[in-house]
């Protein structure tokens, strides 16, 4: 029976949830793919754990100092890396080194954090192509919301003309509060921070960079674009004042922070900013932690997806969806063909 | 260069649109898959055309009497059948014989009409498994709306707990008219028939059988269920009276004909009937020709997809999406791996 050794780099809430879900699904991997999937290593920035025979859930609370870094993952003998570290698109974050070394070694990489993909996407794609390793990133492209899946599977063969996405929960929360509770931006932000909906430094969300990062990943990995942050016009919601809020309310419009992309005559333009939707538009009803995307294609018209999973479980499930696609293609290349009748 | 010979059985609006779109995409198949895709045969119930070197668009208006039937397709040397005939779930329709003979011969089948899949789904799956042929049916499972794709790709690894689908355009049109124009069922139906939104005999739509057929296909091919029409409770909208319409309007609820399925403790129950949605629910805003599905899973919560392509193009595109998945897996099995970096 084929053995698949998985390592998880980045062991915060998402990394831990991914480990727990993976271990809980070992029996599924056995039954569906005839594969023995083992979690052979996990690590945070300073500590980790490794066991070539496979870690068990109860052991994951006792990380050992010093076990961390790309060399630690390399030494674990893992075939597949799941990268779940903090995201920093300006530097690539700690994930970049892990992903780079994995792809160089031909180790498949499942990426959850956006930083490295935004900072060094083309380099990472080239590394994957060169080594034959698979680079998967469902967890980084709006997590449980189907985005690249839709383009590559559901809309396969169609030409994507436009994309618009509501991809950030914090700005959903803030705009909802400003529209429905009559709060100003600062007051809404204070409440969001108090209830854990916004970070101490919220600018990555409120100024649109998180949305821009997801849009960029979607464009570059889903549509083979080669955009950088410099190609995007990025506006956040920090300057949305009471006047605009009142006007939108009076017109029955609902504002969302939207990442949008359009392609015409071979030219692609992308931006992040506030868009308003009438109440008859399903996107007007995507609020709170929900995310949504609308993709317009030449042959299938408009396709909308709306996701609403609870974190960190939903993001963990998105990463493990990638794992199953790796298992599927590996098993398929090994000769057997699961799901032959699909 | 690998040659893929495609035959289309059933040459009404959808079959013809599929032929036109396939021929228009030949260059794409060449560039993306390195495949020479040829349309070697098309046929309706009484006439057809065949050319082993590949038919051209301008020739498709001159079908020759007598060229029809499974033997005609067999003789065309096609590797892949696209079945686009009329749908009859009570008999399997003309498509059943075409699909059966194709799968028996190891010829991949892309099915657009629902009849054969509802009538003989398990038999057809068994034939495909036995011969190694692929049986694809995106076009039959609500056409351009992603349904089985979502389950197999976007939600892969998750356990599906519930599904609800707005899958029929005619009942959308009728319920909209009854809610917004104050028409009774018969009057709304008359207008729908006059404007081509409903058939002369509308019962397949209005009594819920079209929705039930799509739900059954989704359950049996997307979730490995083995349901028959007898397992479904099917209620249509023909008996919806002014009283209920007024009450819903007063409560701010929007009625839709919904096919729903739920799985608990290994038991699956499925039914078709009217459901109402508050205006805050995106499904309340799925009207006219749009279709939608909400899938609830254990790990990803609720995922909604909404589709709105114009027919017959959108259905043709759904069938040709299946064609590209066949090309992908065939090319992959041949050794090369397209989209390695995905």
Image: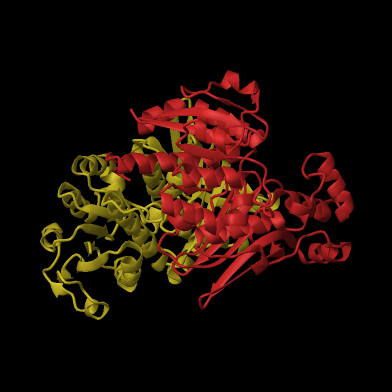
Chain colours: A red, B yellow
Residue A145 lies, in percent from the top left, at 57, 48
Q: Quadrant of residue A284?
A: bottom right
Residue B199 lies, in percent from the top left, at 38, 63
Residue B96 lies, in percent from the top left, at 22, 51
Query: In the image shown, does B338 or B41 lie closer to the viewer?
Result: B338
Q: Residue at x 59, y 65 (%)?
A: A227
Q: Residue at x 16, y 67 (%)?
A: B46
Q: Specify whether residue B299 is in view.
A: no
Q: Residue at x 48, y 48 (%)?
A: A135
**Above-or-below relation of B219 to B83:** above
Residue that sits furthest to the bottom in the current view: B58
Q: Quadrant of residue B111?
A: bottom left
Residue that sits furthest to the top in the current view: A58
Residue A251 lies, in percent from the top left, at 78, 67
Q: Quadrant of the N terminus of chain A?
A: top left
Q: How many marks?
A: 0
Query: In the image shown, does A188 or A27 lie closer to the viewer?
Result: A27
Q: Specify whether residue B121 is in view.
A: yes
């Amino acid at each position: 029976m084929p053995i698949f050794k998985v390592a998880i780099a980045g062991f915060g809430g998402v990394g831990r949830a991914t480990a727990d879900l993976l271990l809980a699904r070992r029996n599924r991997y056995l039954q569906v793919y005839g594969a023995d999937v083992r979690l052979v290593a996990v690590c945070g920035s300073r500590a980790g754990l490794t066991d070539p025979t496979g870690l068990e859930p109860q052991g994951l609370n006792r990380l050992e100092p010093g076990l961390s870094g790309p060399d630690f993952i390399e030494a674990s003998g893992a075939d597949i890396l799941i990268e779940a570290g903090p995201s920093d698109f300006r530097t690539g974050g700690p994930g970049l080194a892990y992903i780079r070394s994995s792809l160089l070694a031909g180790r498949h990489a499942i990426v959850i954090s956006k930083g490295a993909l935004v900072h060094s996407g083309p380099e990472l794609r080239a590394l994957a192509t060169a080594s034959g390793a698979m680079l998967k990133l469902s967890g980084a492209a709006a997590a449980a919301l189907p985005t690249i899946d839709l383009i590559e599977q559901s809309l396969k063969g169609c030409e994507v003309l436009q994309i618009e996405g509501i991809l950030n929960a914090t700005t959903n929360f803030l705009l909802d509060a400003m529209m429905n509770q009559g709060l100003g931006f600062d007051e809404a932000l204070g409440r969001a921070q108090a209830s854990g909906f916004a970070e101490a430094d919220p600018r990555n969300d409120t100024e649109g960079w998180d949305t821009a990062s997801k849009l960029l990943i979607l464009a570059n990995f889903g549509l083979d674009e080669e955009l950088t942050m410099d190609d995007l016009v990025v506006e956040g919601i920090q300057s949305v004042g009471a006047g605009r809020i009142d006007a939108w309310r009076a017109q029955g419009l609902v504002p969302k922070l939207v990442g949008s992309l359009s392609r015409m005559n071979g030219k692609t333009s992308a931006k992040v900013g506030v868009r308003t939707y009438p109440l008859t538009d399903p996107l007007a009803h995507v609020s709170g932690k929900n995310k949504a995307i609308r993709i317009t294609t030449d042959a299938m018209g408009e396709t909308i997806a709306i996701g609403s999973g609870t974190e960190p479980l939903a993001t963990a499930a998105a990463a493990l969806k990638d794992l199953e696609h790796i298992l599927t293609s590996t098993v398929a290349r090994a000769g057997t063909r699961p799901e032959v009748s699909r």
